[in-house]
Amino acid sequence: MPVRRKSRKALRILSIETSCDETSVALLETSVARGSISAVKLLHHETATQIPIHRRFGGVVPEVAARTHVAELVSLLERAGIFGKGKSKFDAIAVTKGPGLATALRVGVEAARTLSFATGKPLVGVNHLEGHLASAWLMPQNRKAWKFPILALLVSGGHTELVLMQDYCRYKVLGRTRDDASGEAFDKTAKLLGLPYPGGPELSRLAAKGKADAFKLPRPMLDDPSLDFSFSGLKTAVRVLVESKFKIHDSKFTAALPDLCASIQGAIVDVLVEKTIRAAKLSKPKCIIMVGGVSANASLQEKMAQRVKQDLRGVKLLAPPKGFYTDNAAMVAAAGLWRLRQGKVDQWKKLDAEPELDI
Amino acid sequence: MRSVKFQPGKKISRLSVPTTDGWKPGAENVLSQLKPGSILAVQGDLGAGKTTFIQALAKELGIKRFVPSPTFSLMRSYKVSPAVNGIKRLIHVDAYRLKNARELMVLDLDEELSDGGSVLVLEWPEKVEAWLAARMKQTVKLSIE
């Protein structure tokens, strides 16, 4: 496969992401000069968020997700302009192969396999989590600071992991959640407070007006020497607190809601920050990246920046470009590019969705 | 203290559990009632202790991996080796995000359960009651209050 081009040749990667809520397509162009990447340009990027549909159903419904992915993916690919006649619009295809919902993943994987078969272009199956790690690399100034080892805190609705990136495509999980993901902790404690789905963002919004030390909540696993997380017990603590002190929706509860939200957010953020700092002291990274939907949380960003500055001299804290925290195809293209440059190409005949894929 | 109610078939038994680390006897009791093809429906509110109970059950089955919440992924499975009472695999499903039984169909759980060595642990069974009602014979109910 003609992956390596002559000097200063542009390489275009078409990427597809359908692992859960979002259907997303991107076209990423990189210029490779003398073997190294000299420029990265996002030519096209479009995400059809499925949240309005799911809000009606109160969650991500796999069957609905798969059906809307099919319709949306075809239209997104068309809008990316890849079906025109004449010279081919892309040089390789990257697709999320897992982890995620099997039915949703398969829509993207089948489309990518078909495109690879029809065009003969190389195909790269990408781990969704690696995609999130690559999201921070999409930022031009981050690429300048990009020096391994890099410590990544990946926080989303389905994931909470501390990953040490030793090089491109060489990762080690240092810690992960033993039960609920941090995004899930936000959403479920929000539910306990009677906030509508998805409650996480609403909880953070209310928390901005409250005091984080108003209610005492446990910081799970902080005393544990491991770098793992646990957020399940926080639900129980919030439940007990609410049941013992309030009646949901009475005036006393409504008045205390911002303080409750701030206290919950404080408990989650404290644990995420503390474990990241601890991991950094052990693994001595050159940079720390914070990626995934929960990393958009303002309080987490602020506290992490503060602690990194205070405790880790010379370590840079990097974030993805705004709008690339949640699932998107641009990050899949970036991770696909990393793999492609390492010669990690998949055969269209063999690539399959891997719903339980780990990093 | 938490109260756990078991309902294997017609008989009901109760067990009181201290909030931390007291799930072992309950897990042992439940495990003795499961065999390949069984469904364990675990009911309980957010924060009631379902996760902790299921982790204790996984421990009884000799599973060393973490058993994180399948709310987001809907389904996770774990190899049981060596087999316990003929059980070779634990399938953990969470119906929290599902609206009705029809949506469970995409997980193809009947197929998953028909391999002769799997048990299914189902959280939020009340969301998929119709599906469970058709499989009552193989179901053990458990509620945590």
Image: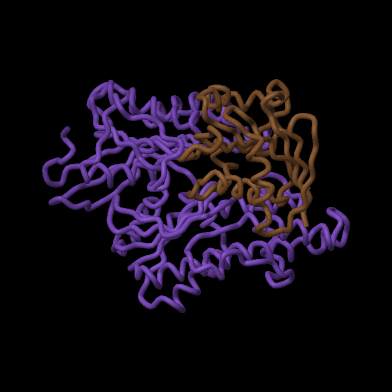
Chain colours: A purple, B brown
Q: Residue at x 68, y 69 (%)?
A: A212
Above/below status of A353 relative to A161: above
Q: Residue at x 33, y 28 (%)?
A: A82
- x then y, percent, for residue A14: 33, 35
Q: Residue at x 85, y 53 (%)?
A: A249
Q: Residue at x 65, y 48 (%)?
A: B53
Res A21 visible: no
- Which quadrant does the N terminus of chain A fall into? top left
| Viewer-closest of A273 and A111 | A273
- x then y, percent, for residue A210: 71, 67
Question: Which of the 4 image quadrants contains residue A143?
Answer: bottom left
| Viewer-closest of A285 and A87 | A285
Above/below status of A197 relative to A190: above
Above/below status of B74 relative to A315: above
- x then y, percent, for residue A197: 68, 44
* Left or right side of A243 for B52: left
- x then y, percent, for residue B85: 56, 35
Picture mark count: 0
* Left or right side of A94 for B114: right
Res A201 visible: yes
| Viewer-closest of B140 and A320 | B140
